[in-house]
């Protein structure tokens, strides 16, 4: 499954680029994140609890940062394992550009899942993946702009 969208963030492009590579920002923006540690050079490790349909699982995963063009673009490659619930793999390609209102962040996300979660059906999974991606980037925008999200 692939999805793409964009956000206009009222912040300088370089600040947006730097922020998306901090574990604190990732933890603040990933729904269900209990812990995020690491660095762009070494990669990040995360513990995330999510409920997909009737299946709730704790995923332990790793995110690697590749194809970095400082201040312009990067690609995040992640993989998480949720025990008997299954696994999730994905990539997010993020491109930043100057915009009159700050910075335009364009993302393309590809996700794959397997195991018990995959048995829920593509409609539920696709909806969940889109919701997660949208929540992450909405939260990121809110964090960058200092906006309280409900």
Image (spheres, grey):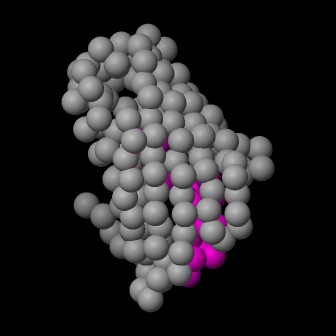
Across and down, in percent, residue 96 comes to 54, 69
- Quadrant of image for the C terminus: bottom left
Q: Is residue 140 visible?
A: no
Left or right placement of residue 16 versus residue 135 in this view: right
Q: Main secondary structure of the magenta part?
A: helix
Say which quarter of the image contains residue 95. bottom right
Q: Position of residue 146 (x, y in %)?
A: 42, 74
State the residue at coordinates (26%, 19%).
120
Magenta-colored stretch includes residue 95: no
Q: Residue at x 33, y 23 (%)?
A: 56
- Between 2 and 56, the one lying in front of the other is 2
Q: Is residue 148 visible?
A: yes
Number of numbered labels in the structure image: 0
Outermost residue on the bottom side: it is 100
Above-or-below relation of 59 to 28:
above
- Quadrant for the N terminus, please: top left
26 lies left or right of 3: right
Q: Is residue 127 above or below residue 75?
A: above
Pick the front one: 136 or 95: 95
User: Magenta segment: does it hold 27?
Assistant: yes
Q: Residue at x 34, y 53 (%)?
A: 134
Magenta range: 11-33
The residue closer to the viewer here, 138 or 50, is: 138
Residue 1 vs residue 42, the one in the foreground = 1
What residue do we see at 46% from left, 57% from top? 107
Q: Position of residue 74 (x, y in %)?
A: 63, 56
Which residue is most to the right?
Answer: 41
């Amino acid at each position: 499954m692939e999805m793409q969208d964009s956000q206009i963030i009222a912040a300088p492009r370089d600040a947006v680029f730097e922020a998306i590579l901090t574990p604190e920002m990732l933890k603040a923006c990933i729904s269900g994140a209990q812990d995020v540690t690491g660095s762009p050079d070494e990669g990040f490790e995360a513990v995330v609890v999510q409920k997909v349909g009737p299946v709730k699982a704790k995923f332990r995963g790793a995110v690697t940062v590749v194809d970095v063009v400082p201040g312009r673009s990067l690609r995040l490659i992640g993989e998480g394992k949720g025990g008997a619930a299954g696994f999730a793999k994905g990539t997010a390609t993020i491109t930043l550009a100057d915009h009159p209102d700050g910075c335009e962040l364009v993302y393309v996300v590809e996700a794959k899942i397997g195991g018990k979660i995959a048995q829920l059906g593509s409609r539920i999974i696709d909806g969940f993946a889109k919701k997660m991606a949208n929540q992450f980037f909405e939260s990121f925008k809110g964090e960058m702009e200092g906006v309280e999200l409900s």
